[in-house]
Amino acid sequence: MNISPIHFSDFYKTDHRRQYPVGTESVYSNMTARGSRIPEIDKVVVFGLQYFVHEYLIKRFQRDFFDQPKAEVISKYKRRLDNALGFGAVSMEHMEALHDLGYLPIHIKALPEGSRCPMRIPFVTITETDTDFFWLVNFLETLMSNAIWHPITTATIAHEYRVLLDAAARKSSDCPGFVEWQGHDFSMRGHTSLESSCVSGMAHLTSFYGTDTIPAIDFLEEYYDANSDKENIGNSVYATEHSVMCMGGEATELDTFRRLITEVYPKSIISIVSDTWDYFGILTKTLPTLKDEIMARDGKVVIRPDSGDPVKIVCGDPDALVDSPESKGTIQLLWDVFGGKVNSKGYRELDPHIGAIYGDSITYDRAKQITDQLMAQGFASTNIVFGIGSYTYQYVTRDTFGFAIKATSGMINGNRVSIAKNPKTDNGLKKSAKGLLRVDQIRGAHGVTGFTLTEDVTPGEELEGALEVIFSDGEPGRKQTLSEIRARLAQG
């Protein structure tokens, strides 16, 4: 459906043009993460702005507004407002003038994507380039916020998983590089729309390479100059689902396993969902029966439990009968059958022919519990892969990190004014910055270590600093690549 992007707003935004003081010529706003509801996180990962600029400010505005007959798009917009707000409630002259102009007279600056921006430091500023269109700045707030908060939130949480898993691997594993695939995106089916799954899937891939979200790779090629022929964007493996395992019946489950690992996939990684009927029976009966075939393969068989308490299934249930399969958990049971090695750090690593992945209801806290308990039991943290799904990437809102776009400066009749909100009824979260803003890098021995904000700067000072132009007068700024973003995030 090709809806004109001037419809991508809230009704209350549509007549703010008349509400500003007479003589208003400029509005200057910023986007900021005002605070975190996740105690461990005090910075957000900037990501998704380039997608927003190219998909909406350039592609959709051009295709569905500027390239359409003016009379048609204005008539549709007028009908929508007339039906909702009353006939003639909002005049159309300003939208007609925008169509006549032929581009968005907007200037947007942002921190480079992949930057880790502290809470309450603006990562975006936006203003107009033509005083006739001062109203357009905050008219775009709804669309901009809608498109950007989710990829930043996903990229931030994915990075926290990466930090957690990197730290555990450095302590317990001889293959810390495996962490790049230890967080695997399983979230596509759980998102609210196809677009949200693609955008969130892109964000996941800023910190990991494992994904089952195919179109996320297409989005990265489209919007971030990635090329899967020349670089590793994302990987997955062969895997079963319950329909496959159920079809042959419970009585022939052993034969299904054998056929999968010896005939269908005699080489490579194959992930087999194993809780269709008796999960612990698979670990204690089926796998020992198939041990010789598994050990003879050129590849890894990955066992996937998909129900129960993730921590207890992987690490064992301390309340279960002593020495029972349930008390031992997945990793210990796999070790009992297939063994492995004690690495240079003194932790046990499963034989490379066998592995495990858990992807049901994984959260950051559960991932931490699992890696902590595995290490306490003497196992390397990299013995398990986590399928990170909608339980992580959809249990969030715009308020998870308090994203907001607020005006801090303007011009009235040629005079610059500094503005700010500071509600007495608030706890300080909604207090905004004031005036023109400048963000500067904090640099250490190994590169950028953070950012600082200076408020109420002069127009000349505002032009400098760490914020870079990403859009101006209908044209994009410097395009950043996925590889650059990954490198910047890894450095940070």
Image: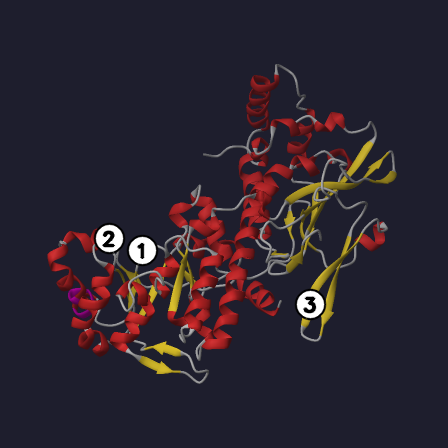
Q: Which residue is mark 1?
A: 306
Magenta: main secondary structure:
helix
Secondary structure of the residue carrying numbered label 1 = loop
Q: Is residue 222 left or right of residue 342?
A: right
Colour pattern of the rendering: secondary structure
Which residue is farthest left? 251
Nearest the camera: 481 or 318?
318
Residue 105 pos. (x, y %):
70, 41
Tell me, for residue 118, which label it has, or none.
Answer: none
Reply yes or no: does residue 98 show up in magenta.
Answer: no
Q: Which residue is mark 3?
A: 448
Q: Amino acid at mark 1?
A: Asp
Image quarter where the N terminus lies is: top left
Against 365, residue 3 (above or below) is above
Disc 1 to disc 2, C-alpha distance: 10 Å
Query: Closer to the N terminus: mark 1 or mark 3?
Result: 1
Which residue is farthest bottom? 344
Q: Amino acid at mark 2?
A: His
Circles 1 and 2, Cβ within 8 Å, touching? The answer is yes
Which residue occupies 80% across, 47% down?
Answer: 436
Between marks 1 and 2 in the image, the one whose residue lies nearer the viewer: 1
Query: Closer to the N terminus: mark 2 or mark 3?
Result: 2
Disc 1 crowd rating (10 Å Cα; few below 14, some 14-19, many 20+) is some
Q: Which residue is mark 2?
A: 242
